[in-house]
């Protein structure tokens, strides 16, 4: 069976969920071979094997942490040369897309970004993309070289399928350009203790109706009662009420939680593009004509300043 390279997104060996989704999709195309760069390979290998990696190629070097993406591209290219895969799959993060573009250029291959689904085709992998704010889906195939494809988080539910996950060292030679841009400092974002937006099982989002940065505390309180992540519409982000890293939608993040609660959000098509595949959608909006109500499983017509605190108290009370 053909092998499919899967680039591993991890923090010190803790594999992030988008990689497990990639492994699940990769199995439709062939045998997944994971590429783990940096520290924590042994820890990561157990998880990668559980989700179907037949092999884990790993390399650790200070270059991966000290310089921007190019050393990782060098390593992924070395893995590509070692394996001759049928496809290379990379998570659709900002870093993932840069790695993918550089790799595709180096190996003379076509690139598809932001796929939301993958299937095996007679002439190679077929990628589904969601375009024009999710109004259309397109299917495309790379016709030149080994397809390099980035896949958006939450495109598939991770399914365990234990495989050997044998760890092999990858030999990497860094090129001159690898050390062209050095990382001079890192400022970790303050931890809120909340789950990462794209990986959360529950997301509570606020929009223009929240009416001010200080009022986002209401959204955060409900999120904390539910163990949820906080999202925001672009209107709320553009107003400076919440950081862009929390924006849900076409120009923000795509989420697909079990439960999505939208408070004071009208439901513009660009917002829907980032949340419409959520399993259960609840909206709180004082305008019963708001388009978000066309999409919801449960709608509350009401003032969020009354409904959200009541909901928070009820959730807390039920949790005891
Ligand atoms: P509004 O549309 O103003 O809606 C506010 C809602 O709050 C209203 O329905 C109102 O009834 C309700 N409300 C007000 N007060 C209360 C209250 N007290 N209680 C309950 N309800 C209340 N948008 C995104 O969200 N994400 C994107 O990624 C994104 N990308 C875009 C990309 C492009 C190219 C463009 C052109 C637009 C994009 N937008 C995006 C913007 C999008 O078109 C909308 O303008 C935006 O989503 C509106 O945000 P909102 O729903 O918070 O605000």
Image (cartoon, helix red, strand yellow):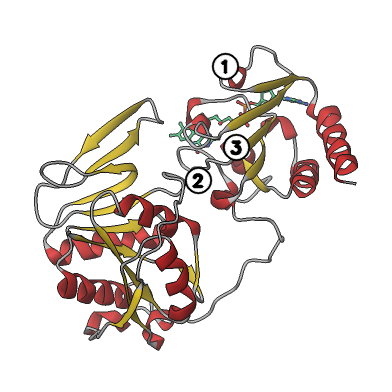
Element marked by disc 3:
loop
Q: For label 3, count other residues whose C-alpha is less than 10 Å away and answer few (under 14), some (14-19) or many (20+).
A: many
**Disc 1 to disc 2, C-alpha distance:** 21 Å
**Is residue 249 found left or right of 262 in the rendered image?**
left
Residue denoted by label 2: 253
The residue shown at (60%, 55%) is 196
Does residue 89 sit above or below 164 in this rendering? above
Q: Are marks 1 and 3 in contact (CB under 8 Å)?
A: no
**Disc 3 to disc 2, C-alpha distance:** 10 Å
x and y percentages locating residue 2 in the rendered image: 17, 59
Residue 181 visible within the image: yes
The residue shown at (87%, 36%) is 314
Foreground: 201 or 69?
201
Foreground: 288 or 115?
115
Residue denoted by label 1: 294
x and y percentages locating residue 202 in the rendered image: 65, 43
Does residue 189 sit above or below 319 in this rendering? below
x and y percentages locating residue 11 in the rendered image: 51, 71
**Disc 1 to disc 3, C-alpha distance:** 17 Å
Q: Earlier in the sequence, mark 1 or mark 3?
A: 3
Q: From the Cβ of disc 3, is ligand 1 less than 8 Å away?
A: yes
**Is residue 37 found left or right of 86 in the rendered image?**
right
As drawn, the label of residue 233 is 3
């Amino acid at each position: 069976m053909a092998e499919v390279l899967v680039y591993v997104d991890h923090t010190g060996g803790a594999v992030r969920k988008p990689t497990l989704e990639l492994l699940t999709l990769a199995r439709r195309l062939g045998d997944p071979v994971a590429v783990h760069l940096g520290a924590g390979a042994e820890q990561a290998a157990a998880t990668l094997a559980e989700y179907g990696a037949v092999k884990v190629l790993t390399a650790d070097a200070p270059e991966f942490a000290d310089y921007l993406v190019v050393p990782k591209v060098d390593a992924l290219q070395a893995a590509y040369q070692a394996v001759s895969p049928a496809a290379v799959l990379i998570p659709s993060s900002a870093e993932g897309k840069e790695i993918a573009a550089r790799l595709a250029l180096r190996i003379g291959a076509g690139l598809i970004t932001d796929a939301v689904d993958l299937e095996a085709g007679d002439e190679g992998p077929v990628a589904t993309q969601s375009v024009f704010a999710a109004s259309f889906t397109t299917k495309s195939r790379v016709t030149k070289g080994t397809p390099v494809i980035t896949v958006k988080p939450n495109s598939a539910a991770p399914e365990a399928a234990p495989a050997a996950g044998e760890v092999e060292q990858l030999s990497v030679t860094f090129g001159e350009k690898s050390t062209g841009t050095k990382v001079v400092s890192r400022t970790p974002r303050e931890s809120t203790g909340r789950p990462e937006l794209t990986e959360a099982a529950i997301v509570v989002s606020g929009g223009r109706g929240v009416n001010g940065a200080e009022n986002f505390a209401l959204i955060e309180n409900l999120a904390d009662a539910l163990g949820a992540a906080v999202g925001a519409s672009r209107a709320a982000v553009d107003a400076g009420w919440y950081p862009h890293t929390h924006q849900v939608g076409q120009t923000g993040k795509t989420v697909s939680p079990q439960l999505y609660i939208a408070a004071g959000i009208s439901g513009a098509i660009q917002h829907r593009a980032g949340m419409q595949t959520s399993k259960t959608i609840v909206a709180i909006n004082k305008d019963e004509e708001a388009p978000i109500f066309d999409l919801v499983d449960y709608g509350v017509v009401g003032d969020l300043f009354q409904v959200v605190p009541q909901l928070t108290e009820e959730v807390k009370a039920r949790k005891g």
